[in-house]
Image: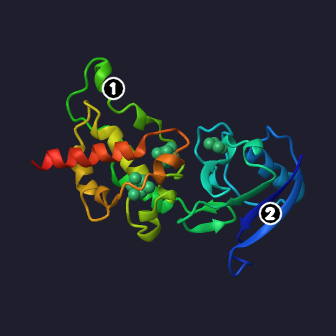
Amino acid sequence: MEITVRIKRYDPEVDPRPRWAEYRIDVTPTDRVLDVLNEIKWEMDGSLAFRRSCAHGICGSDAMKINGRNRLACKVLVQDLGSRIDVEPLPGMPVLRDLIVDMEPFLDSYKAIVPYLINDDPAPPRERLQSIEDRARFDETTKCILCAACTSSCPIFWTNGRYIGPAAIVNAHRFLFDSRDQGSAQRVQVLSSMNGVWRCRTAYNCTEACPRGIPITQAIEEVKRELLWQRQ
Ligand code: SF4
Ligand code: F3S
Ligand code: FES
């Protein structure tokens, strides 16, 4: 089938502002948007810039706005989009070039919640054991691939880029509810701050955008409740 792909392009050295470029291309319905972008880059216009790596929904590098929704280009089939596809960089993030956004502020928020296990007890001879129930407590939030589809779909983040955003909160949840971790004081400080978890207004965009199906809004509510418990 022949489709029309419009890509919002921007080269800061040449373009005063982003512009739409249009491509007519032959595809098979089961091609993914990533296949289409590769075809355009390899056969039609080598200057097109976008990130990708694993091509299988694991690395999180090809999140972009496709027909109005944040998704991974490697997980969306052309047959589910129709004969006209619009591709834009993730909203609310500074565009470096074409579909490539600056991930540094996003990763700064991730680093701020101290995303690793903290436990100063002497190491046991083997692993630090945990019950099945305790492990299940944070199972969903271990699935994050840091694609930024959630944070860049959040209306609160659009108006306040300093809000740490759902991705950082999801990763805080992963350690906050880990029975082996002792680092919650550091995380709670960040989460309770002016641009922390209380900025969330339960818009749900983040949950709808997550390609890993993580119940993000629920995780955020659990973090809020935990903060209230710790205050008492
Ligand atoms: Fe991506 Fe989901 Fe992680 Fe957000 S929570 S960064 S949408 S995988
Ligand atoms: Fe934003 Fe998700 Fe909260 S979209 S307002 S972080 S529920
Ligand atoms: Fe890795 Fe799509 S290329 S998630």
- 166 relative to 144, above or below: below
Q: Which mark is residue 207?
A: none
Q: Nearer the viewer, mark 2 or mark 1?
A: 1
Q: Secondary structure at mark 1?
A: helix
Q: Which mark is residue 47?
A: 2
Q: Is residue 213 left or right of residue 231?
A: right
Q: Which residue is mark 1?
A: 135
* Image location (x, y in percent) of residue 96: 62, 67
Q: Quadrant of ligand 3?
A: top right
- 22 relative to 187, above or below: below
Q: Is residue 14 left or right of residue 123?
A: right
Q: Earlier in the sequence, mark 2 or mark 1?
A: 2
- 136 relative to 75, above or below: above
* Image location (x, y in percent) of residue 194: 27, 65
Q: Residue drawn at (43%, 50%), measured in percent from left and top? A: 167
Mark 1: which amino acid? Arg
Q: Please name whichever residue, 173 or 185, is drawn nearer the observer in this view of the structure.
A: 173
Mark 2 CB near ligand 3 (8 Å cut): no
